[in-house]
Amino acid sequence: MNRELLDFAAAHDGVFTRKHALGFGLTRREIDSRLGSAWKSVHEGVYRIDGTPVTLRGRLLAAVWSAPALAAVSHRSAAFLYALPGGSDDVVEVTCVRWRRSREAGLVVHESRRLAERDITEVDGIPAVSPELLLLQLAWQRPHVGYLELVLQAARRRRLITFESMQQEFARHAGRGLRGVRALRAVLEQWDPSQRVPRARWRRS
């Protein structure tokens, strides 16, 4: 097997795409001959080296790479990556510009025509939505002021966001009728950038 591809897969928890394999010099016939034996199909066009342990990182990468256009880990999965309240490793949650597959167990897909390159960063090599956009997504999922206060303060303590960055991101979405905007606005209006962030009242187990 192609050593460069094996090294790439090893660095990405055993996961890679058909495009990666072609880029490393394998032919379509060689790729097809390995499917079902040396490689296992994870999603359409995304594979895992057989025998590689299934990890959350690998599942998240596979989900993002399976999207036909711009995509990133989001919502509860992104909150878990950032170690913020409400994060979960029990579900793989992504946001993408468009999706080509039917839903499957453990995978939650959000489609957004507004997702842009500026909204995506990397966490442990995984494309994830920015912390600012994540707060808007969590507000949509749980539009409760108390919860959003916890998330905001946790993000501040981890230095994931600033007063200015949150104000800018909120302004991009506040006028679009998104669920949770009112609750998040109430939390942001209480943010005094001259005051230090309070001590943590929440810890992820």
Image (tube, helix red, strand yellow):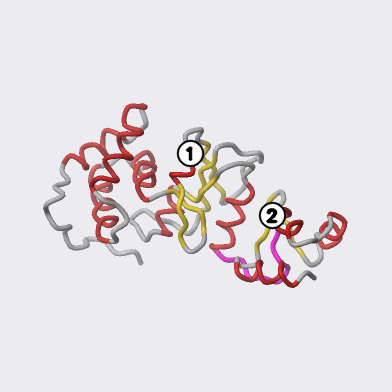
State left or right for residue 143 relative to residue 119.
left
Residue where numbered disc 1 is placed? 115
Query: As rendered, which of 3 and 113 lies closer to the eye?
Result: 3
Percent coordinates x, y for residue 170 in the rendering:
31, 37
Eye-nearest disc, 1 or 2: 1
State left or right for residue 25 relative to residue 101.
right
| Secondary structure type for disc 2 | strand
Percent coordinates x, y for residue 48 in the rendering:
69, 63
Percent coordinates x, y for residue 91 in the rendering:
51, 53
Percent coordinates x, y for residue 78 in the rendering:
44, 53
Q: Is residue 7 magenta?
A: no
> Mark 2, residues whose alpha carbon is within 10 Å: few (<14), some, or many (≥20)?
many
Q: Which mark is residue 46?
A: 2
Q: Is residue 54 magenta?
A: yes
| Secondary structure type for disc 1 | loop
Residue 199's place in the image compared with 28, above or below, is: below
Query: As rendered, which of 16 and 24 lies closer to the eye?
Result: 24
Q: Earlier in the sequence, mark 1 or mark 2?
A: 2
Dominant secondary structure of the residues highlighted in magenta in the image: loop
Q: Residue at x 44, y 48 (%)?
A: 129
Q: CA distance from mark 1 to mark 2?
A: 22 Å
Identify which amino acid the numbered label 1 is placed on: Leu
Q: Which residues are magenta?
A: 47-55
